[in-house]
Amino acid sequence: MGGAGGMLGTVLCYVLLPLTRLVRSLQDALFTCRKNVLLAKSTTTHIDNFSPSISGKSVPEEQQALLQQWLEEGASDLHPNECGSEPEKVSVISFTEWREGSELLMTSLSDLHISPQSGDQEQPQQQHVVQTEMSPALQEFVETALANIPAEEQEALGDSAVWAAVRTQTDSGIVDAAPLSTDVWIEDPAVIAWSPAQEGDMVSAQGEVWPFQNTGQFQPVSLEIPYHEILWRDWEDLSAFCIPELGSEAGCLFEFRVMSYNILAQDLIEQSPHLYMHCHPDILNWSYRLTNLLQEIQHWDPDVLCLQEVQENHYWEQLEPALIMMGFTCIFKRRTGRKTDGCAICYKQNKFQLINANPVEYFRPGLDVLNRDNVGLVVLLQPLLPENMGDKASSPLCVANTHVLYNPRRGDIKLVQMALLLAEIDKIAKMTDGSYCPVILCGDLNSVPDSPLYKFIRNGQLYYHGMPAWKVSGQEEFCQAVHQRKLQTPLWPSCLGITDSCQFVNLCQSKKSDRRKYSRAFLLQFRYCDVACERPADLIMLEGVTDAVPDRPAHWLKELAVVNNSDSELFCSRYPGTIQHGLNLTSAYSHFLPERGRPEITTMPMGVGATVDYIFYSAKPIRNDNQEYRRMYQDGALKLLGRLSLLSEDILWSANGLPNPFYSSDHLCLLTSFGLEISDC
Ligand code: KL2
């Protein structure tokens, strides 16, 4: 009996479930392929000189007509079984069905390209059309670049397949078409991957469809995952939270979009093929991924782009030239040692001017805790204000990008890598008056939200002494090792030249000499001032020691409270076993999807979803009366205006994880829109 039950279980697990999933996938795949063909036919969706400005309101007539045409074609009936035989009869779900039929599509992606004041967003005619077709020059360039890719990287790609990597996330507001020819759909790996009995290695003559080839002999009925629909990402417009407060000053914001994207280095795929067993080989092909990645970047059109896992040869040969054609200037820093990939920061040349770029190598010979090849990159950018802002000056913007060590057991190394980066940011972002200019910290931190490393960045301090090293990143919930490495004080030796406040020693020495100027009498006058009576946000709670609030003597004048509390040196107590930083960073993402009641996912190693990628930005700490120590922030000079929503694990599961034909990395990109306040505006 038990055996039979077991058998039944096995059959259910290994045969029926995958079979059900397969059938669904295949049905869905047809949809994608029909959509691609439709888009292929709509070559007229190319719109010259489109500028995806957030403030644009009107859509030129010709664009409206194209959009209307597209919607009308899309409104025809669905004929699921006709895809293979009659691609020209392809149609898509109507716009309304699409919007209302799925909770995923509750808000419109087009919000990204529409100002909050631009009126009724339900009216497609009033929406901005975005086309992400590559410009002919860029297209030609990538074709040439890809022609130089060694033959083994090109296998299974037809000539037109370069353009087959279509991103079809699209709605009434965004028409996203690559110049496909109608026969491309057969060669599109997104389609090939789910097509029956193609000549090729993923589908056998028996109709056995990869990646389910070990589960039996299936006759696929229909094929496809509607990737664009499942993987839809909403644009969350957060500007309402800060625009009212700004009132008439709303025009005094310098708006820019920031993307952080770990694009998965090809060499790393080749080094760990077991991590990508769930992917069809064709979608792992670099030329396929490159096209897809470039289209995704061009689609979202960030002004600052922080990339991780950028393979050096791909950077010089393809990525940088393509990004330059998109208007970026790029800076690349390869990992040290024999690692072939690194980080890049690219910025739109018409939006920023480079003041300073500092690569950071976390490898320091002779230091055990810095014996890995990871790197970071910190740049200082001067925003180039539009002419209508006259001669106003904006403060510079500091952008940092990093890819922290992966090893889940070596949280000690991760923390020190972070400390090094924060010291570099401190150096570059600190202005002459000792305050920081706005900072944006992007990257793959290989640590999950609310892990000690995350809390360190967000709360500005961490008590680490005695903590098991594997706990730092929160990547794993338990550790099997008998002898667990524990974090010891100090975390790094003083010869590194970095204080426990993550500042370079030479930079704080001058500060110390400044401090000597303060006499005891001078300092005493601040004993009962407002700031002194307020609990510093970064003061550790020690019962009976730091929980008391001093009573202000009756004769003490309130007006004496004239202290510049930006000088945290005065109030910050130092404890052994702790590290601090003073950057006031908060995350642009909340790590949770309230509508789905699930955590956000930025990557899916081995099918397990996690957030490890972040965009942190400087904000103003505000008073927090919670018992538990967690800093609260409100936006300061940098306002978070919006972000591209992330997805949940279950959604990515239904698209067979990451990478998939639609998203070509094992990470999702993060995209935020910021407004930088222009002073005296
Ligand atoms: O987690 V990552 O993937 O941010 O997407 O960063 C690292 C890992 C990247 C660079 O080192 O390579 C991946 N198991 C799984 N993934 C690994 C491993 C491993 N042992 N080593 C490196 N990576």
Image (tube, helix red, strand yellow):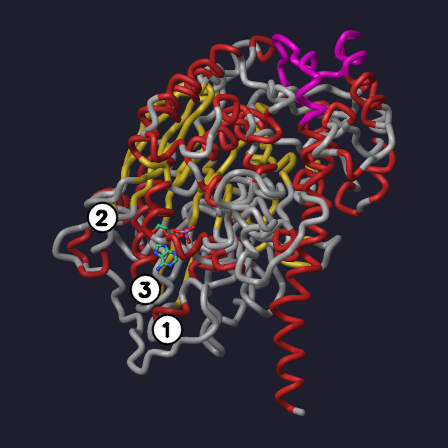
Which residues are the magenta region?
37-66
Left or right of residue 141: residue 392: right
Q: Is residue 463 above or below residue 66?
A: below
The span from disc 2 to disc 1 (Cα, nearest Å) is 26 Å
Q: Which of marks 2 and 3 is nearer the N terminus?
A: 3
- Of label 2 and label 1, which has the lower sequence position? 1
Q: Mark 1 points at which residue?
A: 467
Q: Residues within 10 Å of mark 3 (few under 14, many from 20)?
A: many
| CB atoms of marks 2 and 3 within 8 Å | no
Q: How far apart are marks 2 and 3 (CA)?
A: 25 Å
Judged by depth in the image, the label closer to the viewer, 2 or 1, is 1
Q: In this view, does 572 lie above or below 402?
A: below
Query: Residue 45's spot in the image, x, y percent?
Result: 69, 15
Q: Distance between the residues labelled 3 and 1?
A: 12 Å
> Is residue 62 covered in magenta?
yes
**Residue 142's spot in the image, x, y percent?**
43, 20
Say left or right for 29 vs 79.
left
Q: Which residue lies furthest to the bottom in this view?
A: 1
Q: Name the residue under label 3.
A: 410
Label 2: which residue?
A: 505
Q: What element carries label 1?
A: loop
Residue at image point 74% right, 35% down: 240
SS at badge 2: helix
